[in-house]
Amino acid sequence: MIGRVTQRSIALNSLTNLQNAQSRTAKLQEQLSSGKSLSKGSDDSVRAAAALRLNDQIAGNDANTRNIADARAWNTTQEEALTSVADRLSYVRDLAVRAGNATLDDKGRAAIVAEINEAKASILGSANAQYQGRAVFAGTRDTTQAYDPVTYASADNGAAVTRTISPGVDMTVNVNGGAVFGTAPNSLFDELTDLAAAVTANNGTAIGASLVGLDSRISKNATALATIGARDNQLDHAEEVNANQLQYLRTQLDDVEGVDMAKTYVEFNMQNVAYQAALQATAKTIQPTLLDFLR
């Protein structure tokens, strides 16, 4: 039996077709504006799951890149501080050698003591160097001061500050203050105080012992600087690896959810033309009746 085709059924079918055409046009327009073929998981559950995994990996890569930048800042802060310490220690050693001259008078020794104390204050400032308001030579303790300026007590807990710089790779970014400056009462600052006292007393034996101690401190400081240099090289390698990985992940993600802009633009124009033509055809097909005027 053939059903009767009414004006109402024609209108409903035409409206459904128009809505479908409009939906297809809107979807193509969204792809053009976002540059993505997936707007929601239901578009393609398999590709959506793959895109989610890739986005998680990219987020992890971004976090590692930030950690590398943070690790570099730690290295730079410590390197600048320890380079200054190396310069001051070398200067103090020269002063100690001069102080060992038995012919030096009281005025000369007093001048050397003043310079030793000035160098000690400078080294203490370097030992209390900070990054983002945190003492870098205090281990994992969140404090602004690694060494007390009066007692020379150390806040360093000997723990390692680490940063994840690549998947599964954690790097120590701090130098333990105790390894370079020691701890009271046998800290570098105590040794410099003893040296100043030995110079004041014109005690050649004590000055000689201080020279031995200074050489040891200079060696430990050089070792710390070498460690920082090795970490810089490790960061350079990690940065290169992360950059390559990020490029690969973005290429993969584009393959999964990207769109061919030229092809999509042509399809959008064709769909839009078809939609406009459908509107015109529907307007001619559905003619107003007398009932429409009587309502």
Image (cartoon, helix red, strand yellow):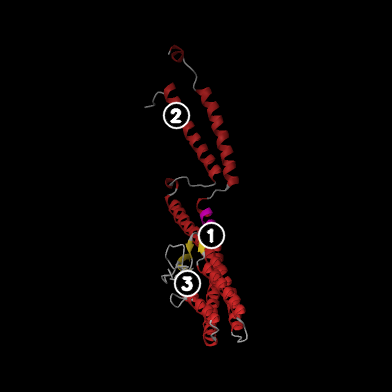
Name, please, the residue furthest toward the top: 294
Mark 1–mark 3 distance (CA, rounded to whole Å): 36 Å
Q: Is residue 166 visible?
A: no
Identify the mark at residue 177; answer none if there is no mark. Answer: 3
Where's residue 159, x and y in %? Answer: 42, 70
Q: Which residues are magenta?
A: 250-254
In the displayed structure, 242 sits above or below 12; it is: below
Q: Residue at point 44% right, 11% down?
A: 294
Nearest to the observer: residue 21 or residue 186: 186
Quarter of the N terminus within the rendering:
top left
| Image quarter hosting the C terminus | top left
Q: Secondary structure at mark 2?
A: helix
Q: Which mark is residue 246?
A: 1
Q: Secondary structure at mark 1?
A: helix
| Front of the two marks 3 and 2 | 3
Looking at the picture, which amino acid does disc 1 mark? Leu
Q: Is residue 44 left or right of residue 25?
A: left
Dot 3: element: helix
Q: Position of residue 151 (x, y in %)?
A: 44, 70
Calculate the distance from the C-alpha at mark 3 to the C-alpha at mark 2: 81 Å
